[in-house]
């Protein structure tokens, strides 16, 4: 059976960058990950980590930021010895 190891990364979310159609309402604010957080996430991806989920940690007022999210990542347990 496949064994996994997990890690988390706190992501900084930049303020809203406009509106897009939403499922439950007429529009939703577009939120972008901050450049430094994106860089950290890409480094983990290069090390074999796969993004599993993202959970919002703090909700700021609409179009005010930053807010934060927790990225949950996994990789095969045997990958730790390879990187």
Image (cartoon, helix red, strand yellow):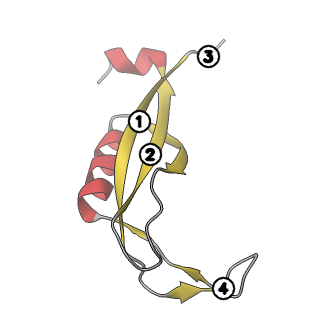
Instruction: Nearest to the eye among marks 3 and 1: give it.
Output: 1
Decide which of tag 4 and tag 1 comes sooner along the chain. 1
- What is the number of callouts on the image? 4
Quarter where residue 13 is shown: bottom left
Asked whether, in this view, residue 78 is left or right of residue 12, the answer is: right
Which disc is residue 8 wearing? 1
Q: Residue at x 33, y 50 (%)?
A: 42
Instruction: Nearest to the eye among marks 3 and 4: give it.
Output: 4
Q: Which residue is mark 4?
A: 21
Does the CB distance between marks 3 and 4 fall below 8 Å?
no
Q: Residue 24 in the image: x percent, y percent?
A: 76, 76
Which residue, as the protein is rendered here, is positioned at the far left?
36
Q: Which residue is mark 2?
A: 70
Instruction: Nearest to the eye among marks 3 and 2: give it.
Output: 2
Q: Which residue is mark 3?
A: 2
Decide which of tag 4 and tag 2 comes sooner along the chain. 4
Decide which of tag 1 and tag 2 comes sooner along the chain. 1
Q: Residue at x 33, y 35 (%)?
A: 47
């Amino acid at each position: 059976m496949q064994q996994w190891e997990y890690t988390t990364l706190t992501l900084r979310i930049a303020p809203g960058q406009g509106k897009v159609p939403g499922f439950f309402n007429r529009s939703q604010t577009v939120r972008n990950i901050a450049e430094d957080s994106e860089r950290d996430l890409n480094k983990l991806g290069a090390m074999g980590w796969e993004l599993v989920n993202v959970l919002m940690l703090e909700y700021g007022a609409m179009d005010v930021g930053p807010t934060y999210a927790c990225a949950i990542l996994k990789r095969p347990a045997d990958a730790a010895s390879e990187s």
